[in-house]
Amino acid sequence: MTAVRPILEDDLQAYVDGELDAGRRAEVEAYLEGQPDVARRVAEFVAHRAELQAAFGPIAHETVPVELSVARLIADRRKASAYPGWASMAAAVAMLVVGAGAGWYGRGAFEPRLVGVVALAQEASASFATYASDHSRPVEVEAGDSEGLLSWISNRLKRPVTVPDLTSSGYRFMGGRIVATTHGPAAMLMYDDDRGSRLVMLMRPMREQFVPMSDQSADGVAGFAWAQNSMGYSLTGDIAPSVLHPIANEARRQADKI
């Protein structure tokens, strides 16, 4: 049996960049499952990469203003150098203009904006806070009409979906609804157990194809988020992260069969 090559930093970077083949990607994901701290760091790298793409992607295709073009800067510099008294001033002006160019391309890049599974986890927490405590109508479509619910969700997300079966963990499927997020529509599924504890799963299409599961627990609410096959998932509940983690792993295992 061939031994698995050690997972190096280069492998993690290639994973973030989506440059690994399927076999090596599976090895990296298996490694990350046993290394939660590394998995969290990789998830942050993926989120940062997506944030940079979102910030600079559209700008990269814009036409550079003529006053900021390299040719214009060089021509202006040559004109200025013909007059010795103005040489140093021209250099200073050129530096200011280049700085303005950097500002042009960096405009909006530092606006606070969550992306990737970090944003998804926050959206799931918001849905949990809104609907998990609702005892009159927590879901729009109940579990008895799962077929209609799945058809509705698949049409809105334009992706085939399934409902993870969490009964082995003691949680029954209650139903679901479509919720709005800043990244488009998402499907919210809800589960409960005999004690009345509820879990919320949020899923929506993602730009990233694969993101390892990471602990996104915050403010006393446990949460785990990941992405596979360009679909993001986040499972949230008011239980200990150590209890929620294996349930999230089971949901991920079932979702991988879609």
Image: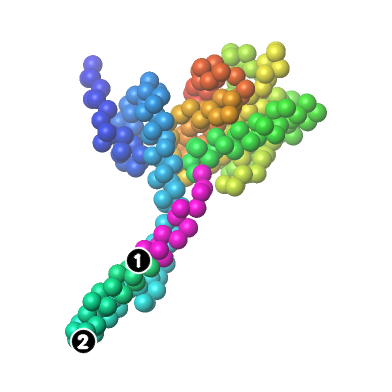
- In this rendering, does residue 160 appear at all? no
Q: Which mark is residue 83?
A: 2
Q: Is residue 46 above or below residue 98?
A: above
x and y percent of residue 54 in the render?
A: 46, 52
Give, as a three-letter code, the residue at label 2. Answer: Tyr
Side of 155 relative to 6 (left or right): right
x and y percent of residue 216 in the render?
A: 51, 30
x and y percent of residue 113 in the render?
A: 51, 48
Q: Is residue 100 above or below residue 240?
A: below
Check disc 2: other Cα within 10 Å, few if <14, some if 14-19, many if 20+. Answer: few
Q: Quadrant of residue 89?
A: bottom left
- In this rendering, does residue 129 appear at all? yes
- Which residue is the site of mark 1? 99
Q: Is residue 108 magenta?
A: yes
Q: Report the residue at 59% width, 25% height from top.
A: 220
Q: Is residue 2 magenta?
A: no
Front residue of 125/18: it is 125
Task: Tell me where the magenta segment starts and ends, as one range.
Answer: 102-114
Q: Report the residue at 50% width, 37% height from top.
A: 118
Label 1 residue SS: helix
Label 2 residue SS: loop
Front residue of 191/157: it is 191
Task: Give the dominant element type of the magenta stretch: helix, strand or loop.
Answer: loop
